[in-house]
Amino acid sequence: MPTTRRTFLQASMAATLVPAAQAAEAPPLTRPIPSTGEAMPMVGLGSWITFNVGDDPQLMDECAAVMAAFFAGGGHMIDSSPMYGSAQPVIGYGLKKLGQPKALFSADKVWTSGDGAAQIAETRSFWGVPRFDLLQVHNLVAWETQLPLLFEMKAAGKLRYVGITTSEGRRHDLFEKIMRDHPLDFVQLTYNAVDREAEERLLPLARERGIAVIVNRPFQQGALTRRLANAPLPDWAGEIGATRWAQLLLKFILAHPAVTVAIPATSRVDHVRENLSAAAGPLPDADLRERISASAREA
Amino acid sequence: MSEWWTYRAEDFLLFSPRSYWRMFELQNEAYWPLPVLMLALGGIVTFLASRGGRSALRWAAAILAGVWCFVAYTFLWNRYAGINWAMAYVAPAFVLEALLLLGIAIRPGVRLQPRGLSAWIGYLLLAFATVGVPLLPSLHGRERSTAEVFGIAPDPTVVATLGFLILLRGRWPALLYPIPLLWCLLSGVTLHTMGEAQAWMPFAVVALVVAAAAAAAIRRPLPPPA
């Protein structure tokens, strides 16, 4: 068949579109959890704000649909906290509706200066799971009491992994000290194309100590994606198969070698698919990461 | 709270606008046709407040006390606390305000002053709470089903109460201002943090209450020289 202008254009478009389509359908890349080697898909699902919908049946079903799309796209880790209002029972509702998906990696937190064991028991009943994969001390609240409790649970086989969390760059000095002094499996912290403080000490230390890193607030609670909503996507975004700013921002995070999983929260099925696809294609090199960061700062 | 100075209002926002506005939709559905009847009740409070006299004051205060309790239980406790645990602490404050309203209903020395500039601000707030606030969804591009109705939702209930309080004279009504004014500030900050244009409303109400207080102070005759 002779090559006409039309067939050339069709072939060119197909060449451009096929990798993106394949990337959207391919499962997300995985990174090993350093303490066990267990493979973890690099995009998880956060529940801060988005899953706090009370007992509204319509919104609970929408959250369940997001979870269904998340598992269908190859996601494993769902993260929540007692601080997130009704998010825990809403996750439990979704899990029940989806028939307790085997792929689930359940991550929650203890957030109290009181009875941590009682809070964890209540959290577990909300989720409807026999045990958690990961429990973290939320924002280091009463960590001197709660961290030993989590290690006891792990030793007794009631928990698989132990971690601590912080957000928005708070208490990094204490966070670093706990990372050095305790055999943590996971840390959770804020890291994105604009908030890069974790690169200085925490991320290198996590690599050195063999601690998995969960990244929260990858889009600055939506502020970054809102700021970039009207900015044109740079031409070079196509080099790494990104078709949306959200994917570029996620790829920036996932490309850091210390990062295990990022947990963007969303209430939309199309966004959860878009997030998962960010981990299915190529990741940016150091030069491209700097360009993503610069674009996000300039927006 | 450690490093409290690093926290912003956004850090305390636990829910999204869609969850927030859906609460009013569900509340209106759950108590339908009460929202329509409450519009009439708001009109009755305005009418009573404009009549003056002890009996009108008592009836108006009793109606307001009832709707504060209703909103505290059905909205703050049963609904809003589901997405914002802080509401479990705010609901008792609403009940306290209801008790204070009952207190001024029986307290001698409290009277209605239905004339003057500050009184007109009071009427304006009563009318706005009853018929203006439910129309705000149309102004801000939301579904009308998310309308906040006097006696069903906190904002219009609080605004109407502030309008009523402005019409009162005596020492005791001053005790009733803090809870509704604090609610207005809390509601305004919440809406502003969610990026909702309607945030202007609670702040404007606070400004009007301050203006009414100033107008009342200017009208008050100076004490005779010693």
Image (spheres, coloured by chain):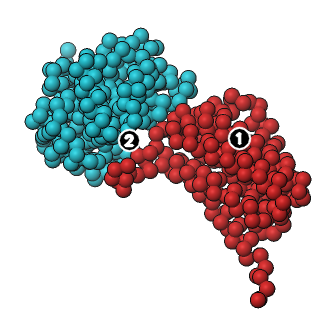
Spatial CA distance of label 1 from label 2 is 37 Å
Colour chain B appears in: red
Task: Give the residue drawn at x 90%, y 59%.
Answer: B53
Asked where in the image residue A130 lies, by quadrant, the reply is top left
Asked where in the image residue A111 lies, by quadrant, the reply is top left
Circle 1 Cα neighbour tier, 10 Å, few/some/many (<14 / 14–19 / ≥20): many
Q: Which mark is residue B69?
A: 1
Q: Given the image, what chain letter belongs to the residue carrying mark 1?
A: B
Task: Give the residue drawn at x 18%, y 25%.
Answer: A33
Return the x and y of residue B12 as percentages of the image width and height: 44, 45
- Can you tell which of label 1 and label 2 is closer to the viewer? 1
- Any idea which chain is the cyan one in this picture? A
Farthest-out residue, bottom: B226
What number of labels is visible? 2
Q: Which mark is residue B51?
A: none
The disc labelled 1 sits on which kind of residue?
Cys
Judge by depth and name the residue closer to the eye, A52 or A276: A52
Q: Does the rendering let one see residue B130?
A: no
The disc labelled 2 sits on which kind of residue?
Gly
Q: Secondary structure at mark 1?
A: helix
Q: Secondary structure at mark 2?
A: loop
Circle 2 Cα neighbour tier, 10 Å, few/some/many (<14 / 14–19 / ≥20): some
Q: Does the rendering let one see residue B213?
A: yes
Farthest-out residue, left: A208
In the picture, the quarter occupied by the N terminus of chain A is top left
